[in-house]
Every structure is written in structure tokens, then in C-alpha cells.
Amino acid sequence: MPEQISFSQIEGVSAGNAQNDEAKTGVTVFVFPEGAVAACDVSGGGPASREVPVVDVEKNDININAIVLGGGSAFGLAASDGVMKCLEENSMGYDTHFAKVPIVVQSDIYDLSYGSAKIRPDSAMGYEACKNALEKNSPVSGNIGGGCGATAGKICGMKRAQKSGIGYAAFKLGELKVGAAVVVNSFGDVYSNSKKICGLMNEDRTEYCDFLEQLYKTVSEKYAGTFKNTNTTIGAVFTNGNFSKSDLKKIAVMTRAAYAKCIIPCGTMGDGDTIYAASCGTKVPSDVNTAGILATAAMEAAIADAVYSSRISDEEYLSNIK
């Protein structure tokens, strides 16, 4: 049976955070000191992303240097400028002979309705998060980095939604290690072991309401207007398995099953759901199916961690919504 391990036991990747605690937004940067083969699966209809085409299976096999998961919607993509600057200063990047160009991919959540909409992750914040990653700090779950402004269950607006955040989990089977990190900022409700743990609440916030029941009931009423591109669950899986870009694409697609199981609904046109998959570290021989199954299990556990580690009081939550 797989053994659950800490995310920090995944070799070849380190995580760092930076955020504006008052504005409730931030970034999380995953750095690959030796580079990583990577691919990506985008199942949502409204992603905010940068440089994702470089990990397409039809493109050149160029190792990436960092994955950035951030807030600020498309505004927050500026954080990668600072990540690139920090990596360049540390001589990391694709060698073009004239300069080393860091290969950085990024996906952002929409968190402008929580905290301040006028302050977003920028180059300075990206630089700080990358610097922290290079110092190999332990990953932190909850209301930190890219998870600062994450929320879930927004069909009836922010007043009936709940706070979520960023979460981590990892498993080991023999020599194979697979870890997951995820920022849960979903349109839908969040479940763990078939139990709802975050999402749509009733008007006085005393109990949960069923999201799908509310959707069917109000599809032509005032709340239907909230079905916009203001949600996104963004995540990544990391493995020491020796996989090609096409293998990793399959692993990312398999991991989507965790989203479907734990977030209802997911992958809508109102979400920008994205999963990266990266091969780093010792590159042990492995099987794609096994890695995909472990990645799915790790993502399920990381989604639960993102919710449980970001719990705050209703009073605090309501004081930060628009």
C-alpha cells in the first residue's frame, strides 16, 4: 500500500510563498533547481495563464524552471517577471548562448472579490516568493501564498460562500514518490470522502445548501449571473518518476478525476481549472498508470488540506468580501 509522506520529501522541487495579508492575495512558486519535464491539462473554460504552451506535448522538450500558482486573475501574471529575475540572478534558465532564459509557467485564480481588488501579485511579490523557494522553506498550507484569496461555493455570491486556500499531500510506493499542491477557488462545493466540507451556505450561514439543487432552482433567476469566469482551481502534481512530456500529460488528465470527485461541479465555463504535472528529482523508472493513480489520491488529499487548513470565522470571512 502507498505510504503517505510529507510534500517536502519530493526531491527536485521547493516551494516558496509571498502575499499581501491585508489585500488577501499572493503567490506560491515551485522551483526546480535542476529543471523539470512538465505538461499541463486545462479543463476549465476561463483560465488565466502564462507560458502554458511551452509544456504542450507538441512543443519542444525544454525543461521548465518554475511553476507559479497565484492570485489576482490575469493581473497577477506579472508575478512571473519577478520569478524570472530571481532565477536569472541564480543562473537558472534555458541557455540560449547569449543569456539564460528562465522557463516559468503560471496559472492564477480570480480572488478580486475577496480582500482588495486593487492590489494584485506583482513582480516584487513573485521575486520574494521565488527567493523563499530557493531557500527551501517547508511548504505551508492554508491562507498563504496563492491560497490567500481562495473561496468556494459562489453560485449565490460571496456572502454565502466559504474560505478555502492552498493544500498539499504526497504518497510513496516503493521508490516512486508523487506529491500534489492545489489552490481551491471553486465555483462548486468541495467534498472529502463524500462529505461536503466547504461551499454554498444558507442565507444566515447556519448550514450547507446543496449547490446543484440551487443551480437547478435558480438557473433563470438573479443568481445565474454569477456563473462567470471568476473561479479557478489550480494545482500541480510532482513526481520523481522518469516520464516524458506525453506521459505527464496523461498523468495530469488522470489527476482531473480528483477534481471531479471532490469539487461539484468543476471544469465549467465559469472555472479555469488547471493541473500541471512535473517530473523532477531522481527520475526513477515507473509506470504511468501507477503514477496517475497516486497523483489522483494525492490531489484528493491536497484538496481536503486546502479547506481544513484555511478555516476562519464567519466574522473574519464576511469582513473581507465585496
Image (cartoon, rainbow, N blue to C red):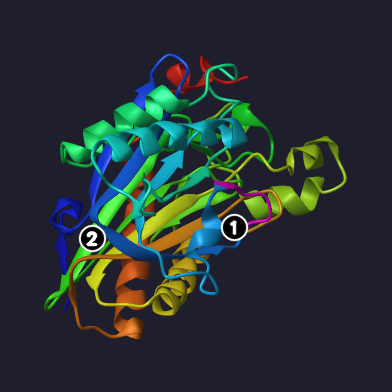
Residue sitting at the far front: 98
Instruction: Name the kind of residue labelled 1 in the image.
Output: Cys
| Mark 2 neighbour class, 10 Å CA radius: few under 14, some 14 to 19, many 20 or more | many
Taking depth in this image into account, of 194 and 206 the one nearest to the observer is 194
Q: For the N terminus, which image quadrant?
A: bottom left
Q: Residue at x 67, y 49 (%)?
A: 46
Secondary element under disc 1, as helix, strand or loop, is: loop
- Answer with the quarter of the image where residue 286 lies: bottom left
Horizontal relation, residue 39 to residue 203: left or right: left
Q: Residue at x 43, y 69 (%)?
A: 255
Q: Position of residue 55 (x, y in %)?
A: 48, 63
Q: Amino acid at mark 2?
A: Ala
Of 171 and 225, which appears nearest the observer?
171
**Residue 312 visible, this angle:** no
Q: Residue at x 23, y 39 (%)?
A: 90
| Residue that carries the numbered disc 2 in the rendered image | 170
- According to the picture, the residue beneath numbered tag 1 turns out to be 266
The part of the chain drawn in magenta is 44-49
Do we see residue 217 in this rendering? yes
Towards the viewer: 128 or 110 = 128
1 or 2: mark nearer the eye? 2
Q: Compared to 297, does 201 lie above or below?
A: above
Is disc 1 surrounded by few (<14), some (14 to 19) or many (20+) residues within 10 Å?
many
The answer to if 315 sits in the magenta stretch is: no
Report x, y in % for residue 259.
49, 61
Q: Where is residue 34 drawn, in percent x and y?
A: 22, 57
